């Protein structure tokens, strides 16, 4: 009986991981349940043993994607050289590899227009995910007051996500790379670091 429960949990996680990649790569509206199940190597009929609806799956996938981002951010911050924590986490995000693989990257950049409009559990999972990331960034930023650290964290996150989106939109490789570099400088300035304050 325990093995059956473990198998069910593992299968659910496989569906969530697969859906997360497909939703980020193709969008929520363009990705159907049947496609997700086929990609996961499962039958469409088994879907409802794990999820009540596509919206239920999407909320779980958004939550898992944010959890993955938090883990990567915290690991990078913990491994960063002294005095270079913000540079390290910014450089982790603004890479050509991240730009080129939306299916494995930031859920905000991939679903930033769709998830907030969806309402319900999807919108709430998206809101909570952003709030949790902002809490982590706030803790990494030195500022005279907590409110100032929170403001800088919001500005930093906006520069990261916006910079990545611009880099993805530019088809010329040199211009796209330049957008990442510009976003890096803007992100450092937004976070209030002493380096690269001016654009």
Image (tube, rainbow, N blue to C red):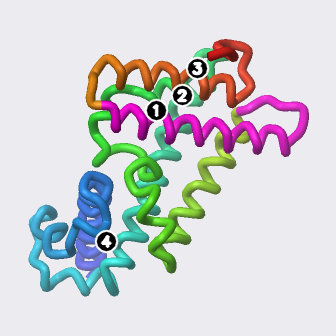
Q: Residue at (38%, 32%) from the top-left corner?
A: 167
**x and y percentages locating residue 92 in the rendered image:** 46, 28
Disc 3, SS: helix
**x and y percentages locating residue 66 in the rendered image:** 48, 54
Which numbered circle lies on residue 185? 3
Magenta portion: prevailing SS class: helix
Q: Is residue 143 magenta?
A: yes
Disc 1 from disc 4: Cα separation: 30 Å
Q: Is residue 18 magenta?
A: no
Q: Residue at (30%, 60%) from the top-left corner?
A: 27
Q: Residue at (58%, 29%) from the top-left corner?
A: 78
Which numbered circle lies on residue 90? 2
In the figure, is residue 169 to the left or right of 193?
A: left
Disc 1, SS: helix
Disc 4 from disc 3: Cα separation: 43 Å
**Which of label 1 and label 4 is nearer to you?**
1
**x and y percentages locating residue 24 in the rendered image:** 32, 54
């Amino acid at each position: 009986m325990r093995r059956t429960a473990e198998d069910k949990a593992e299968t659910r996680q496989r569906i969530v991981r697969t859906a997360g990649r497909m939703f980020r790569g193709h969008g929520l509206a363009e990705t159907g349940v049947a496609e997700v199940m086929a990609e996961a190597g499962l039958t469409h009929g088994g879907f409802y043993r794990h999820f009540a609806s596509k919206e239920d799956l999407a909320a779980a996938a958004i939550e898992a994607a944010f959890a993955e981002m938090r883990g990567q951010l915290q690991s990078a911050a913990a491994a960063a050289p002294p005095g270079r924590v913000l540079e390290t986490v910014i450089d982790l995000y603004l890479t050509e590899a991240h730009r080129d693989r939306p299916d494995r990257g930031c859920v905000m950049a991939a679903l930033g227009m769709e998830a907030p409009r969806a309402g319900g559990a999807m919108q709430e999972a998206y809101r909570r995910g952003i709030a949790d990331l902002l809490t982590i960034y706030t803790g990494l930023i030195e500022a005279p007051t907590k409110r100032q650290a929170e403001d800088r964290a919001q500005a930093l996150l906006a520069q990261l996500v916006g910079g990545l989106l611009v880099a993805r939109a530019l088809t010329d490789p040199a211009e796209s790379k330049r957008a990442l570099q510009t976003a890096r400088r803007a992100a450092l300035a937004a976070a209030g670091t002493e380096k690269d304050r001016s654009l």
